[in-house]
Image (tube, grey):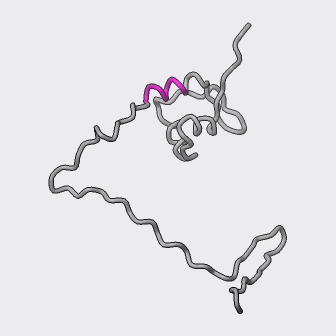
Amino acid sequence: MTSPLYLVGNREIRLMLGDISRQRVYQLTARPDFPAPAASLCQGKVWRGEDVEAWISRRRRPPTPPSAAAPATPGQRQATPRPAPPPRPFIPTTVIPCCLHTLRYRVEPAGC
């Protein structure tokens, strides 16, 4: 008896690599060192899951602990985190798209 075939598509590859973008999956699968697809279907290409997992394990770098990060060289500025952007202003008129038409409603400030 044969074992079940383990196939993965673009979505599964995205999840295997940490929910990367569709464009990044396309870039990676177009590389010459990426495994060849097992089949090309109408909905896209599929790969053998074992081949993709082996490719990921060969390419995956071990995580670097924060204490082992290289310190900045003298004269080089330390990167500082940017402050959060200010909240967007309240707009009293809101447009709600609907199936066949657009509804508009006005929110009146309290006390008017």
Of residues 109 and 103, the one drawn nearer to the viewer in this rendering = 109
Q: Residue furthest bottom?
A: 112
Q: Residue furthest right?
A: 100
- Quarter of the view holding residue 70: top left
Quarter of the picture holding the C terminus: bottom right
Residue drawn at (51%, 23%) of the image: 54
Q: Residue furthest top?
A: 1
Question: Vertical placement of 110 versus 59: above or below?
Answer: below
Residue drawn at (72%, 38%) of the image: 42
Q: Does residue 57 show up magenta in the picture? A: yes
Question: Vertical placement of 72 versus 64: above or below?
Answer: below
Quarter of the picture holding the N terminus: top right
Residue drawn at (23%, 58%) of the image: 77
Of residues 5 and 33, the one drawn nearer to the viewer in this rendering = 5
Residue drawn at (34%, 37%) of the image: 65
Left or right: where does residue 56 sit relative to residue 62?
right
Image coords of residue 34 (percent x, y): 50, 30
Of residues 92 and 10, the one drawn nearer to the viewer in this rendering = 92
Question: Vertical placement of 42 versus 110: above or below?
Answer: above
Image coords of residue 90 (percent x, y): 61, 79
Q: For the magenta stretch, what is the residue range?
A: 53-59
Q: Residue furthest front?
A: 111
Image coords of residue 26 (percent x, y): 55, 42
- Number of callouts: 0
Principal secondary structure, stretch drawn in magenta: helix
Q: Does residue 58 show up magenta in the picture? A: yes
Image coords of residue 3 (percent x, y): 69, 13
- Quarter of the view holding residue 11: top right
Question: Vertical placement of 25 versus 90: above or below?
Answer: above
- Quarter of the view holding residue 96: bottom right
